[in-house]
Image (spheres, helix red, strand yellow):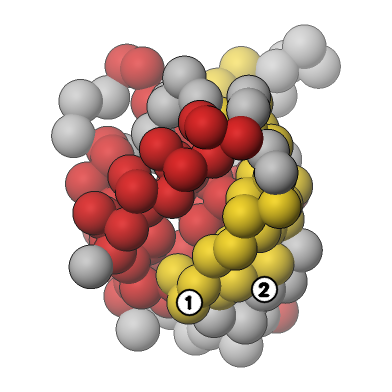
Amino acid sequence: MKIHRHAKIIEIIGKHHVETQEELSDFLLKEGIHVTQATISRDIRDLKLTKIPYDDGKQCYGVHNNLIPGLSEKYVRILRDGFLSMEMAQNILVVKTVSGMAMAVAAAIDSMKWSEVVGCIAGDDTIMCAVRGKDETIIVMEKIRRIVL
């Protein structure tokens, strides 16, 4: 449950500008996840979220991968829990995930900052991952296999 909640939190802050713990709690409630303020606070600490300033003067929750060592551990767990399968189509890697986890798994892949990966687009349970070339796609598949197996 915690991993699923963490994945949802990452998905929510990726889609919306969330300024407060109360807003985050409301978004989770809309997803059918009931949490207390203490749980939200722990999740924010566990995920090492921080407030990111935006041009409009608002500060919203976000992830600073390059500023927070050890964050990839969280993403590795999300990748392991959400991953189902993958298939190569030239330089496109199609990754299947548990329903509702594609955004979080895509964020996990992006957070790994692999030089071979250009970027990911996620739906509900499918990710299209653009990779620099066919040979690099094989390398990325092997990296993912080592993480999830």
Does 8 sit above or below residue 66?
below
* Mark 1 or 2: the one toward you: 1
Residue 124: name its quadrant.
bottom right
* Residue in front for this viewpoint, 122 or 45: 122
Residue, x 50% and y 72% (percent of image)? 85
- Which quadrant, please, contains the N terminus? bottom left
Which residue has dot 2 on it?
125
| SS for dot 1 | strand
Instruction: Decide which of tag 1 and tag 2 comes sooner along the chain.
Output: 1
Does 129 sit above or below residue 111?
below
| Distance between mark 1 and mark 2 Cα atoms | 9 Å
* Residue in front for this viewpoint, 136 or 24: 136
What is the x, y in percent for residue 89? 71, 52
What is the x, y in percent for residue 68? 27, 24
- Residue 52 in sight here: yes
* Outermost top residue: 55
Callouts 1 and 2 close, C-beta under 8 Å: yes
Which residue has dot 1 on it?
84
Q: Dot 1: within a 10 Å radius of its alpha carbon, few (fewer than 14), some, or many (20 or more) residues?
A: some
What is the x, y in percent for residue 126? 69, 67
- Which quadrant, please, contains the C terminus? bottom left
* Badge count: 2
Q: Dot 2: within a 10 Å radius of its alpha carbon, few (fewer than 14), some, or many (20 or more) residues?
A: some
Q: Which disc is residue 132 wearing?
A: none
What is the x, y in percent for residue 112? 39, 34
| SS for dot 2 | loop
Q: Amino acid at mark 2?
A: Asp
